[in-house]
Amino acid sequence: MQKELRFQKSCFIMPQSSLDFLSKESIGIIGCGHLGRAIALQLVSRGYPSDRLRLSLSGSKRSLQNIIDCGLQSCLARNDEICRDCSIIFIAIPPQSLPELRGLSFPQDAMVISCMAGVSLQAIRRILGVEAVRIMPSGPSSIQEKRGITAIYPDNEIVIRILQGLDLRVYRLLDEDLMHIFTVGVCLPAAFLVSEDCDRAMEEACKCLSWQYPDLAEIHSWARNVLPAFGTEEERRDHIGRMATKGGITEAIVESLRENDDMLTALEKGIRRSRDISGRYEEK
């Protein structure tokens, strides 16, 4: 049985800090797809030196070309090099790729920040043998437009300062289980794009779920305000595709809406997908 989280409202922190305090730190990003690349670009745009940044790729030619197009090819490194050289390490791979990192030697004094949806701290500890802080950022475009939000669990002041420096609005979660619902919250922009004229339905669905996570109503307003404008229908579809990782939470919501489920059902399916992902890595 899932424990009740009724009325546990998180607190948020507005962006306000610079990244100057990281001048002596080396940052690595394991998995530089859409999200990892957005974090890297935001770091550099906020003045973090690119020669102290290390990025790894899964081997995709398209991802490599995107890194080259961004002028970050000199930052490319292997995962083991990131673990050897970096004091702050973001893990921004799809959750199903987590077992591929088994065997990496993460320094015990490194700050490891997981962006993997649905993957619990317990699973990270068991599979990678390292302590981590979980965050769940909104989509890459919102990060690069300086309109992004993120959750964090557990509280960590250094990580919060980094996230603030990336212009992210930070929500401190009171319980790790709330990450499942917050993750659905950052998927709301994609739901808006799939289901036209759904604002009232989404508002009602968020109200129904707010007994578990009260901030969802506020996140609904954020999602409505970050929707991009598209010149063509193809641009809109491509944008949704970049947000919906295969097997992920956004995909579950998008597929549900395309099957003509109502909005509440679609969001509940997203929460279940997040819990299913988490369950795959729970110790038997």
Image (cartoon, rainbow, N blue to C red):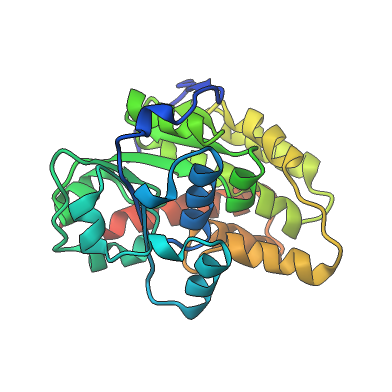
Residue shown at 77% from the left, 67% from the top: 235
Q: Reply above or below: 56 against 150.
A: below
Q: Is residue 212 visible?
A: no
Q: Percent position (x, y) of residue 13?
A: 52, 21
Where is the C terminus found, in terms of image quarters? bottom left
Q: Is residue 190 above or below residue 245?
A: above
Give the quarter of the image for residue 100.
bottom left
Q: Quadrant of residue 149?
A: top right
Question: Which of 267 and 90 lies nearest the eye of the viewer?
Answer: 90
Left or right, residue 189 beside residue 181: right
Q: Position of residue 16 (x, y in %)?
A: 54, 22
Residue positioned 46% across, 67% down in the render: 247
Q: Position of residue 85 (x, y in %)?
A: 22, 51
- Quadrant that contains the N terminus: top left
Depth order, front residue of 233/43:
43
Query: Residue lying farthest bottom?
Result: 61
66 horizontally vs 128: left or right? right
Left or right of 267 on screen, residue 106: left
Residue under the point 37% across and 64% down = 76
Q: Is residue 60 visible?
A: yes
Q: How many marks?
A: 0
Residue drawn at (59%, 59%) of the image:
243
Give residue 42's position: percent from left, percent from top. Answer: 54, 45
